[in-house]
Image (tube, grey):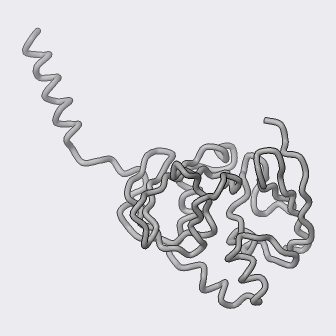
Amino acid sequence: MPRVLALGLVVMLVSACGPKIRHYPELSNRWLFACCNLHFNKRFYASDANYSYAPDPIVVPAGTPVFVIDDNPAELHLLPEGQNQSLELTFKFGTSRMTADQYFHTVLLESDPREAMARTPSEVATAIQEGRLVEGMTKAQAVMARGYPPFHRTEGIEADVWTYYENADQVDVVQFVDGKLATVTRTDAPSR
């Protein structure tokens, strides 16, 4: 019996020292671009809800090169270019609409989205840089400005009504008409 126990311990130690399993090998250990303005709190954490109401959030602007340091089943650790603090991006709210893999591939891009922003009217480009929504924006421009709407409150980007959290108590309900932002209405946040 002691021999079996010792063999089991050796197998566990060898397994623990083996190479790390990559959950998203096509994303890990490489540079990609942030699709949109991503908001992290002071604990260097953000979720797929991309809540921007943390006091003085850490904003990773759209198009920022980010290096994917590490991956786990529902989280990535990112290092934005020019920073020395890694950030944790977790997928947990939109699980009824997509997988973590789909989400991470949506927010981390192969090509720089700022190239598209360079072709937008200057007032829209400024709004994107400032994280504001303005009338007439396309859905892609709204995503660049505020990130993807939380998919536990929005049916998807193909929907014409999106919900963004302005703070813990208020949301901005965004209405699109013919693919263009028509109205933004601030209202009470839905109950949990």
Which residue lies at the image location 10% right of the left edge and 19% below the top edge? 6
Rendering coords of residue 117 (x, y %): 67, 84
Quarter placement of the C terminus: top right
Residue at x 83% of width, y 37% of height:
191
Q: Residue furthest left?
A: 3
Quarter of the image where the N terminus is located: top left
* 75 versus 15 height, above or below: below
**Rendering coords of residue 9 (x, y %):** 16, 24
Q: Is residue 109 left or right of residue 22?
A: right
Report the number of numbered marks.
Answer: 0
Tell me: 101 left or right of 178. left
Q: Tell which of 133 and 100 is nearer to you.
A: 133
Looking at this rendering, what residue extends furthest in the front direction?
56
At horizontal 69% and vertical 61% (from top left) the residue drawn is 148
Residue 54 percent location from the top left of the image: 66, 52
Q: Nearer the viewer, residue 58 or 10?
A: 58
User: Is 52 drawn above or below residue 190 in the view shown?
Assistant: below
User: Seen from this angle, which residue lies furthest top?
Assistant: 1
Location of residue 34 by image quarter: bottom right
* Residue found 36% across the figure and 51% down from its top: 22
